[in-house]
Image (cartoon, rainbow, N blue to C red):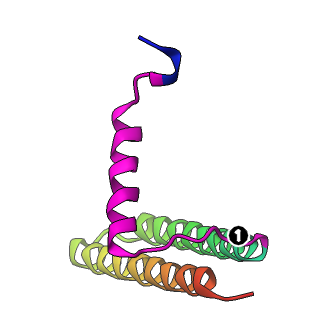
């Protein structure tokens, strides 16, 4: 087999198909600017810290609580807060990606 016709991995083949289907659908991918990359990194860092803080506080509350019903309530609250923070993070990242410089 010739070197210019090297075998491609499944990943490479799938990416080629996605690019082809995007091109046919008229979807254009523009790379992020350095400012957008920095904004996304800052958002991710901020929310990673918030989620870590939430986890630590949750673990502390769980250690203090012995009641099953109270623990279930704390778990539910923790899950909702994680989802809220994740959703908020994703929305801000999408906004930063779409911001025009």
Query: Which residue is drawn at the image coordinates 47% and 71% (left, top)?
Result: 58
Q: Quadrant of residue 5?
A: top left
Q: From the viewer's side, name the closer residue of 1 and 65.
A: 1
Quadrant including the N terminus: top left
Where is residue 95 shown, x and y percent of the image? 57, 87
Q: Quadrant of residue 67?
A: bottom left
Q: Main secondary structure of the magenta part?
A: helix
Extreme-top residue of the structure = 1
Q: Quadrant of residue 51?
A: bottom right
Q: From the viewer's side, name the closer residue of 76 and 87.
A: 87
For residue 16, above or below residue 73: above
Quadrant including the C terminus: bottom right
As for residue 59 lying within the magenta part, the answer is: no
Q: From the viewer's side, name the closer residue of 45 and 67.
A: 45
Q: From the viewer's side, name the closer residue of 2 and 35.
A: 2
Residue of label 1: 37
Where is residue 79 shown, x and y percent of the image? 35, 75
Is 24 on the left or on the right of 4, as rendered? left
Where is residue 85 shown, x and y percent of the image? 49, 81
SS category of the residue bearing label 1: helix
- What segment is highlighted magenta in the picture? 5-34
Query: Which residue is drawn at the image coordinates 57% and 85% (left, top)?
Result: 92
Where is residue 18 shown, x and y percent of the image? 35, 56
Extreme-left residue of the structure = 69
Q: Residues within 10 Å of mark 1 (few under 14, many from 20)?
A: some
Number of numbered labels in the structure image = 1
Query: Which residue is drawn at the image coordinates 28% and 81% (left, top)?
Result: 73
As for residue 10 lying within the magenta part, the answer is: yes
Query: Which residue is drawn at the image coordinates 69% and 68% (left, top)?
Result: 41
């Amino acid at each position: 087999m010739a070197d210019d016709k090297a075998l491609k991995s499944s990943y490479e083949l799938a990416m080629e198909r996605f690019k082809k289907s995007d091109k046919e659908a008229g979807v254009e991918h523009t790379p992020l600017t350095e400012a957008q990359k920095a904004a996304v990194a800052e958002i991710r860092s901020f929310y990673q810290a918030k989620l870590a803080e939430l986890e630590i506080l949750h673990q502390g509350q769980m250690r203090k609580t012995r009641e099953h019903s109270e623990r279930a309530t704390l778990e539910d609250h923790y899950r909702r807060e994680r989802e809220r923070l994740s959703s908020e993070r994703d929305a801000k990242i999408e906004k930063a990606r779409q911001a025009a410089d």
